[in-house]
Amino acid sequence: MGLLNLVLLGPPGSGKSTQAEFAVKRLGLAHVDMGASLRKVAQEPSGFGKKLNEIINVRKELVPDSVIVRVLERIFRTIPSRQGLILDGAPRRSSQIAGVEKVFSETERVLMKVIYIRLPEEESVARIAIRYACLQCGKPFVLGKDGVDAHVPCMICGGALEQRKDDTPEGVRKRLEIFSQETLPVIDYFKSQGKLLEVDGTKDPEEIFQDILKGLHITMK
Ligand code: AMP
């Protein structure tokens, strides 16, 4: 099999980061986290950072396609050519498809499969309401799970736990609306290309990963 180059799509709370983490640890892939990379730039005090903060955290909209392509080009070039990758969160609308495909081809990578983690809207809303992350190391936590409490420090680094700025009920509704209007057509496109691998996001994370491996015809020792 050639180098594994994957795209991962799904609504908020569908478990993209968890699956990407599995892919990093068990398949040795590099994780390209579009949302996290953009959120990092949005914290910068520069004019560009402020503009991204306004789009992501205030208006809760998608950032312009040209920014996506620029950021991706930069990240792809830092990944060794012999390492596969999992791109989490792009393309998120049809107008990004050509740009993202161009970044793959320019860096001599073949996009093998697009993994779509399916999740009902109510489940997405319920999961986001209890999703917290460490402000310091970024580790995600689920409130009420494994003794996690919003007032208890991060068990990895001791940092404070907080909800993402765009993880408000209104922010999730908006992102779900964007997902169904803008991202579902992208998923249809990859389906028509024979590249789609759809998995059930309501299952246990380990089971979902096994479904992904099966869909990719990978057997692990
Ligand atoms: P995420 O962490 O994937 O939920 O992404 C957080 C935010 O970053 C989104 O709500 C968008 O504002 C922005 N974002 C992430 N990926 C993209 C993309 N492919 N196109 C445009 N905006 C994006």
Image: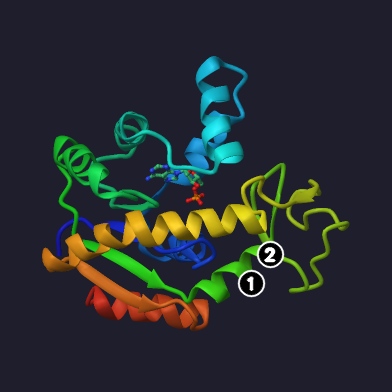
Q: Residue at x 49, y 68 (%)?
A: 14
Residue 221 makes an appearance in the image: no
Alpha-carbon neighbours of circle 2 within 10 Å: few (<14), some, or many (≥20)? some
Q: Is residue 57 above or below residue 150?
A: above
Total numbered labels = 2
Q: Which numbered disc covers residue 38?
A: none
Alpha-carbon neighbours of circle 1 within 10 Å: few (<14), some, or many (≥20)? few
Position of the C terminus, as image quadrant, is bottom left
Q: Residue at x 78, y 54 (%)?
A: 154
Marks 1 and 2 sit apart, C-alpha to C-alpha, by 5 Å
Measured as percent of width and height from the top left, residue 108 is found at: 14, 41
Q: Nearer the viewer, residue 89 or 121?
A: 121
Measured as percent of width and height from the top left, residue 176 is found at: 48, 60
Residue 133 horizontal side relative to residue 185, left or right:
right
Measured as percent of width and height from the top left, residue 47 is found at: 54, 16
Mark 1 near mark 2, Cβ–Cβ under 8 Å?
yes
Q: Amino acid at mark 1?
A: Ala
Q: Which numbered disc covers residue 126?
A: 1
Dot 2 falls on a residue whose secondary structure is: helix
Q: Residue at x 49, y 36 (%)?
A: 38
Q: Nearer the viewer, residue 105 or 38?
A: 38
Q: Which numbered disc covers residue 129?
A: 2
Measured as percent of width and height from the top left, residue 163 is found at: 71, 52
